[in-house]
Amino acid sequence: MAVLAKLQEKIEAWKEEHEALKEKNHHLKSQLASLAETQTKNETLQLELDAKNSRLKQLEEDLEIAKMELEEKDAEVEKILKKVEALLA
C-alpha cells in the first residue's frame, strides 16, 4: 500500500507540474504572438520610412535642380538689366 500511495503522490506532483507547464507554455505562446505582431508592425513602419526617405531624396534632388535653374534665370535677368541700363544710359 505504501508504494501505491507514493505513486499517487508522484502522479499528483506530475499533474501539478504538467498544469504549470501548460500555463507557462500558454504564456510563452502569447508572448510570441505579441512579438510576431510587433515585428510585423516594425517591418511595415520600416517600409513606410524607406519610402518616405526615398521621396525626400527625390524632393531634395528636385530642389537642387530648381535652385540651379533659378540661378541661371537670375543670371539671365542680370544680363538683361545690364543691357537695359546700357540702352538707357
Image (cartoon, rainbow, N blue to C red):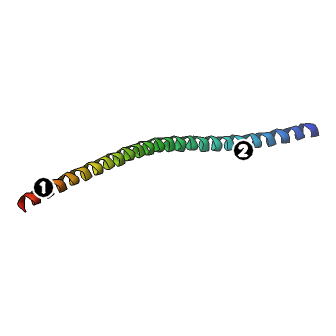
Q: Amino acid at mark 1?
A: Lys
Residue 1 in sight here? no
> Could you tell me how far apart the alpha carbons at marks 1 and 2 are, in whole angstroms?
93 Å
Residue nearest the viewer, comparing 65 with 49: 65
Is residue 57 rendered to the left or right of residue 65? right
In percent of width and height, residue 86 lies at 10, 59
In percent of width and height, residue 2 lies at 93, 40
Q: Residue furthest right?
A: 2
Q: Element at badge 2?
A: helix
In percent of width and height, residue 20 lies at 72, 44
Residue 41 in sight here? yes
Residues at circles 1 and 2 in contact by the CB criterion of under 8 Å: no
- Image quadrant for the N terminus? top right
Residue nearest the viewer, comparing 87 with 25: 87
Q: Residue furthest bottom?
A: 89
* Front position among marks 1 and 2: 1
In the image, what residue occupies the spot 46% across and 44% down?
A: 45
Is residue 75 rendered to the left or right of residue 5? left
- Image quadrant for the C terminus? bottom left
Q: Amino acid at mark 2?
A: Ala
Residue nearest the viewer, comparing 77 with 45: 77
Is residue 9 rendered to the left or right of residue 62? right
Is residue 50 rendered to the left or right of residue 87? right
Say few, some or many: other residues with alpha carbon within 10 Å of mark 1 (under 14 / 14 to 19 / 20 or more).
Answer: few
In percent of width and height, residue 12 lies at 80, 41
Q: Element at badge 1?
A: helix
In the image, what residue occupies the spot 57% across and 40% down?
A: 33
Res 15 label: none
Residue nearest the viewer, comparing 65 with 21: 65
In the image, what residue occupies the spot 60% across and 44% down?
A: 31
**Residue pointed to by mark 1:** 83
**Residue pointed to by mark 2:** 20
